[in-house]
Amino acid sequence: MILSGKHLKSGTESTSRLRWGIAALLFASTTVNYIDRQTLSVLAPYLQVEFKWTNSDFALIVIAFRVAYAFGQTVFGRLLDRVGTRRGLLYMVGWYSVAAMATSLAAGLKSFAGMRFLLGCGESANWPGAAKAVSEWFPHKERGWAVAIYDSGSAIGGALAPVLVLWLYSVFGTWRPAFLITGSLGLLWMLAWWLVYPKQGGPYRQEEEGAQRTPVAGLLRMPTTWGIIAGRTLTDPVWFFITDWFAVYLVAKGFKLEDTVAGFWVPFLAADFGNFAGGGFSSWLIGRGWPVARARKAVVVVGGIGMATLAFTVGLTSFAGIVALFAVATFCYAALSTMMLALAADLYPSGSVASVSGMSGTGAGLGTILSTFLIGAVSDRYSFEPVLIAASLVPLVAVLVVLALVKTEATAADERG
């Protein structure tokens, strides 16, 4: 249902239903996004045997995705601020869906890396676009929940991917149909998005002639921008270590991949709960009169401390214990991540939200690229234990940086609810 601009701004029940429907579509986009990217990670142990890849070889493929994903978030985030949320997300989901399906044609290290680079370009627009949509459709007191909804798609996609992909692998006896079938899911999403999302945008969207689109240089002069960038740069690599390397890590610990399916999804499900816990708790604090940024930062502190539990997996041999500690870490990461994503929508006008979110995504991508190089080299030469220790300490640094740079009084957007 497409509502008129008059109805969109009137706060009607229909508008409320529509905005939560859009949140559901953003959740679906994120879920599909993660299924597409996780297909390779789930199949990695099989592909490593077939193509005789080392962990360092696999790291190169992951890095090809990360390079495109990192720089694409700034490029396409800025593009989304120009072309709008409706068209921008439609085009980019189409892009990465085609790239995911084309991966079924890959024949070696170079072609896999090339396909993953194209996938990374397309998928990079999801978070800037979703943050922009939330800023256009939701008041401050509801944004924590809205961000939790769409960001939880990463956990759901990560949990569904091993079940779906391993099932497809067992049915077809080869990995190629898995890429083709999972990649086609985005095409269905495109149809729903085009039919549901109104052309004129949401009720909190500033008109183009009145919107403040701060130049990139101006955004980078703001300490708050750097606080948001640093927060994601230092914590997202931990999440991507889990999503990209968890299957490889479990095999290195001596577990058979087929025997881990029952517990593989648990850290991703925990992240899903973390999204809502972080979004819900910060919204509760705002409802009790806390300033928006202060409420978000309170969750960041708790999340960063909780991520340090990964260090306790060092030397642990129990599958249940490993899964439980990873689940605590992903729960806390997701709560923290929801806050970092919400801050861009909270503190900047709609004309700059996707740009700031994109720049923070680029920082996260560059941090993940560096960490991926190190993970591949360290795990090949030593083990995953030094990686786990580092993954526990770095988020604590992130907490200190966010507390120092993101100021409650530095908000760049008007309070809208």
Image: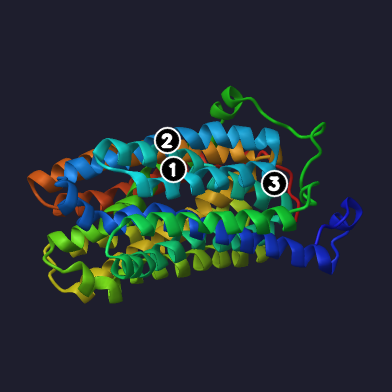
State how far apart marks 3 and 2 are (Cα).
22 Å
The furthest residue to the right:
6
Which quarter of the figure is the C terminus placed in? bottom right
Image coordinates for residue 53, horizontal then vertical, percent:
16, 45
State how far apart marks 1 and 3 are (Cα).
20 Å
Image position of 222 (left or right of 379): right
Q: Is the Cβ of the residue at disc 1 closer than 8 Å to that at disc 3?
A: no
Q: Is residue 381 above or below residue 295?
A: above
The furthest residue to the top:
217
State how far apart marks 1 and 2 are (Cα).
8 Å
Mark 1 vs mark 3: which is more N-terminal?
A: 3
Mark 3 vs mark 2: which is more N-terminal?
A: 2
Image coordinates for residue 235, horizontal then vertical, percent:
38, 48
48 or 270: which is nearer to us?
48
Image position of 75 (left or right of 331): right
Query: For residue 400, what is the image quadrant?
Result: top left
Which quarter of the figure is the N terminus placed in? bottom right
Q: Is the Cβ of the residue at disc 1 closer than 8 Å to that at disc 2?
A: yes
Image coordinates for residue 328, horizontal then vertical, percent:
34, 67
The three-letter amino acid code for the residue at tag 2 is Ala
| Picture disc at residue 217 | none
Q: Please give the residue where the numbered disc 2 appears in the rendered image.
A: 68
Q: Is residue 132 visible?
A: yes
Tag 2: Cα neighbours inside 10 Å, few (<14), some, or many (≥20)?
Answer: many
Q: What residue is rendered at 64% in x and 41% in y? A: 88
Mark 1 vs mark 2: which is more N-terminal?
A: 2
Q: Is residue 230 visible?
A: no
Q: Please give the residue where the numbered disc 3 appears in the rendered image.
A: 86
| Picture disc at residue 119 | 1
Q: Secondary structure at mark 1?
A: helix
Q: What residue is rendered at 31% in x and 67% in y? A: 166
The furthest residue to the left:
381
